[in-house]
Image: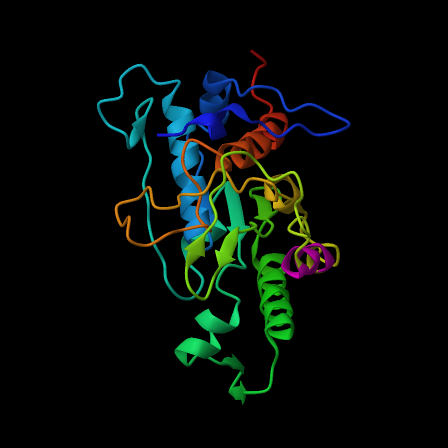
């Protein structure tokens, strides 16, 4: 019932992110393939982008069709899809599943090649995985064809994660208590800085750190389960897409509007 969280907007210090011109964005993305690769946070960003683009479509009879071009959602659980290679935009994210409870607590361990690494730390495994990803990008992706983004780690605001106690607040936090920092985000920057193919890092960790007011909480189709990881829509993920679109509009060279 509380929609005050919609009235807050992140503002950068030394620049401005213009309001998205949806018609210009649709034209820039005409006949383009945009692929989100990641976890459920990536799905949320995908949903946000669809809603954002739909605001510029007069006939909303089909949510999955924009100006005659089909918008599809495809899910790949394991491995690398060949469909990524020929996409125009690749948007990656990772981090939410790299915690002990979701890995070791469920009987999952790390394997490098044919060797099982029982003593490997999560931080080391995450870096190894990103370096594998970077090698794939550098050896496979044509930067003249594909624009690549990597979105950094999204802060959560659990009061007690083990007990699944959520802490959705009335207002954004005035004290972010270190949530503007993530070692996962640092690793992303370190790996990307050593790559050959250009990758644009969308660093959303600090800008999302104070937004304990914008999580799903108990307002979902499963109200018995609190959620202080995922975000309400419209909401915080919209600014992630506004940043991506601001990059893309300049890159694709669509006529200004």
Instruction: Say which of 49 and 219 sits in front.
Output: 219
Q: Give the x, y percent position of residue 80.
A: 45, 62
Q: How is the image coloured?
A: rainbow
In the displayed structure image, the side of residue 141 where residue 16 appears, left or right: right
- How many numbered tags mark residues here? 0
Residue sitting at 60 percent across and 68 percent down? 126
Q: Give the x, y percent position of residue 120.
A: 60, 82
Dominant SS in magenta: helix
In the displayed structure image, the side of residue 185 where residue 156 appears, left or right: left
Residue sitting at 55 percent across and 29 percent down? 242
In the displayed structure image, the side of residue 25 where residue 106 appears, left or right: left
Residue 76 in the image: above or below residue 146: below
Q: Quadrant of the C terminus?
A: top right
Residue sitting at 49 percent across and 81 percent down? 109
Q: Is residue 187 magenta?
A: yes
Residue 142 in the image: above or below residue 20: below
Q: Which residues are magenta?
A: 183-190
Q: Is residue 200 magenta?
A: no
Q: Give the x, y percent position of residue 51.
A: 38, 29
């Amino acid at each position: 019932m509380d929609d005050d969280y919609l009235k807050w907007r992140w503002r950068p210090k030394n620049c401005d992110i213009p309001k998205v011109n949806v018609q210009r964005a649709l034209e820039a993305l005409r006949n383009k393939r945009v692929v989100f690769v990641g976890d459920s946070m990536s799905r949320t960003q995908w949903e946000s982008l669809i809603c954002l683009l739909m605001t510029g479509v007069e006939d909303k009879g089909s949510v999955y069709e924009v100006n005659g071009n089909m918008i599809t959602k495809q899910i790949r659980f394991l491995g690398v899809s060949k469909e990524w290679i020929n996409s125009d935009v690749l948007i990656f994210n990772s981090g939410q599943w790299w915690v002990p409870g979701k890995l070791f607590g469920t009987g999952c361990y790390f394997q490098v090649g044919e060797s099982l690494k029982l003593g490997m730390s999560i931080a080391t495994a995450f870096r190894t995985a990103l370096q594998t990803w970077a090698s794939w990008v550098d050896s496979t992706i044509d930067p003249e064809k594909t624009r690549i983004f990597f979105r950094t780690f999204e802060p959560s605001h659990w009061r007690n994660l083990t007990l699944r106690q959520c802490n959705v607040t009335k207002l954004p936090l005035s004290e972010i208590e270190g949530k503007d920092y993530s070692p996962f985000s640092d690793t992303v920057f370190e790996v990307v800085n050593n790559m050959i193919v250009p990758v644009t890092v969308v660093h959303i960790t600090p800008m999302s750190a104070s937004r304990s007011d914008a999580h799903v909480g108990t307002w979902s189709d499963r109200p018995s389960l609190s959620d202080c990881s995922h975000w309400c829509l419209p909401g915080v993920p919209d600014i992630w897409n506004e940043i991506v679109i601001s990059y893309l509009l300049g890159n694709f060279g669509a006529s200004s509007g």
